[in-house]
Structures are given as structure tokens and as C-alpha cells.
């Protein structure tokens, strides 16, 4: 879907993926040290970025939809936190080197395999040595379940795909499971999920 397509989907008062943080992120909240900084990749309407800010993190949230970012700014105001918002297309964004303690990417399966490889490379570059990447998304089985996410099977993640893509990182956790999720109207019902938490080696130059 294009940025305009996302703008259309996000238009209106309702938060398409809800205002509550993603369950995986909430469950892993203990991993975040207050005072650290985090890049929220394709953060949409801000439910996850705002949650991370509420944990005492400095949040830099990026998304290609201006409508999403307006809603994210409102959610941050209403929640009494600040987040830095940037309107950008991540397919041609200049990923910084070793800038963030954490990189969080929740349901960023808009990218085809080539685009996904560039996204993962950028995320790995942007996190500091010793820092964590937290990635959450769907497995290929999700396409048959049809309860959220794009219809393209090749956009989904498998265990072997993530192990290969993050082979230079320490795998802290990699879990595949099915769960009922209810995140606004966007993600609703039994879902085929996969989570990765990976650490950039501390001595990485
Ligand atoms: C499924 S939504 C997930 C949003 C958010 N991470 C969440 O979990 O609520 C996917 C997001 O990717 C954004 N997106 C799609 N293509 C993008 C691109 N090329 N660059 C940046 N963001 C993009 C969309 O605007 C949308 O907000």
C-alpha cells in the first residue's frame, strides 16, 4: 500500500490499530531502561511510540503517512508524553549509524523481500553496539487466517529467514506462536505471529 493508501486508511477519528500498545511490546517492557532512546520504525498512529515514551524513553517515530503522524501527535498530547515524529519513506531514508539503544519494529510487513532486506540492514546499522532490535510480525500462515496484514505471503517472516537476516546479532529470543489479537479493527482474531529480540554485539565496530 502507498503512503496515500495508508493516509486514506487512517483518516477518521478511530485508531485503526487501537491506542493500546502491541501485546508483545508490552510483555517485553522490562527490557527497556528509562533514559535510553528508541527508534520506532513505521510507528503509524503512535500506540507503540507513545507507550515507549511512557516508559521514560526518548522516542523517534517514523512513518510515511502524515495522517498517522497527526494522530500520533494527538495520542502523545492526550497521554502527556513527548515523541519526536518524522514523516519519511523508509525505503529511501538515510539510516544513521549506531544511534539508538533500541529499534522497535511492529508489523512493518509492507516491504517486499528486497525492501525488507534493506529495512533490516538499516535497523541493524541504526542500533548501538549492545543495543536491542525488537521485531514483531506475521508468519506466512497468516495469509490464510486473514485477520490482519497484507495478503503477500513473501512479506511474512519465518524463523529461518529471521535467523539468517540477523546472523550477525545475538538472538536473545525468537518465538513463533498463534494468538488471538485485538488491535483496533486492523488486527482482529487468531493470528500467526513471530517475535524476534536480537542484540547487536557489544564489540561491533
Ligand atoms: C500495519 S501498520 C503498523 C503501524 C504500527 N507499527 C502499529 O503497529 O500500530 C504499517 C505502517 O507502515 C507504514 N509504512 C508503509 N510503508 C512505509 C514506508 N515505505 N516508509 C515508512 N512507513 C511506511 C504505514 O503508514 C503504516 O503506518
Image (tube, rainbow, N blue to C red):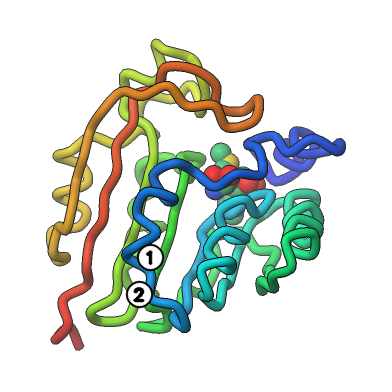
**Quarter of image, res 126:** bottom left
30 vs 36, nearest the viewer:
30
> What is the spatial separation of the Cα atoms under label 1 and label 2, in whole angstroms?
6 Å
> Which residue in the rendered view is the most extreme toward the right?
12
Circle 1 packing at 10 Å, graded few (<14), some (14-19), many (20+), is many
In this rendering, does residue 91 appear at all? Answer: no
Can residue 97 be seen in the rendering of this structure? yes
| Residue 193 on image: x %, y % | 33, 31
* The one of 15 and 55 positioned closer to us in this rendering: 55
| Above/below status of 151 relative to 24 | above
Determine the residue positioned at 66% across, 44% down: 19
Q: Cβ of disc 2 within 8 Å of ligand 1?
A: no
Q: From what the image shows, is residue 190 above or below residue 105?
A: above
Q: Residues within 10 Å of mark 2 (few under 14, many from 20)?
A: many
Distance from mark 1 CB to nearest ligand 1 atom below 8 Å? no
Where's residue 60, x and y in %?
58, 72
Q: Give the residue at mark 2.
A: 127
Question: Looking at the image, which is closer to me, 36 or 95?
Answer: 36
Which element type, helix, strand or loop, lies under badge 2? strand
Q: How many marks?
A: 2
For the C terminus, give its image quadrant.
bottom left
- The picture places residue 175, in percent across and down from the top left corner, at 21, 39
- Quarter of the picture holding the N terminus: top right
Above or below for 169 versus 116: below
x 13%, y 64%: residue: 170
Is 46 situated left or right of 101 in this image? Answer: right
**Residue highlighted by disc 1:** 123
* Mark 1 touches mark 2? (CB < 8 Å): yes
Residue found at x 75% / y 33%: 9
Q: Residue furthest top?
A: 144
Amino acid at each position: 500500500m502507498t503512503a496515500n493508501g495508508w493516509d486514506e486508511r487512517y483518516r477518521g477519528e478511530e485508531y485503526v490499530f487501537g491506542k493500546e500498545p502491541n501485546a508483545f511490546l508490552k510483555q517485553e517492557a522490562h527490557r527497556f531502561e528509562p533514559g535510553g532512546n528508541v527508534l520506532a520504525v513505521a510507528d503509524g498512529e503512535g500506540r507503540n511510540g507513545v507507550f515507549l515514551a511512557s516508559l521514560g524513553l526518548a522516542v523517534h517515530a517514523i512513518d510515511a503517512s502524515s495522517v498517522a503522524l497527526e494522530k500520533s501527535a494527538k495520542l502523545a498530547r492526550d497521554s502527556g508524553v513527548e515523541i519526536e515524529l518524522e514523516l519519511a519513506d523508509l525505503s529511501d531514508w538515510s539510516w544513521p549509524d549506531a544511534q539508538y539503544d533500541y529499534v522497535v519494529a511492529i508489523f512493518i510487513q509492507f516491504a517486499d523481500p528486497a525492501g525488507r532486506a534493506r529495512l533490516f540492514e538499516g535497523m541493524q546499522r541504526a542500533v548501538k553496539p549492545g543495543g536491542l532490535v525488537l521485531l514483531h510480525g506475521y508468519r506466512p500462515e497468516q495469509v490464510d487466517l486473514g485477520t490482519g496484514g497484507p495478503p503477500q505471503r513473501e512479506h511474512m517472516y519465518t524463523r529461518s529467514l529471521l535467523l539468517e537476516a540477523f546472523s550477525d546479532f545475538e538472538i536473545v529470543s525468537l518465538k513463533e506462536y498463534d494468538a488471538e489479537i485485538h488491535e483496533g479493527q486492523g488486527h482482529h482474531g487468531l493470528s500467526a505471529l513471530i517475535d524476534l529480540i536480537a542484540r547487536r554485539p557489544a564489540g561491533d565496530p
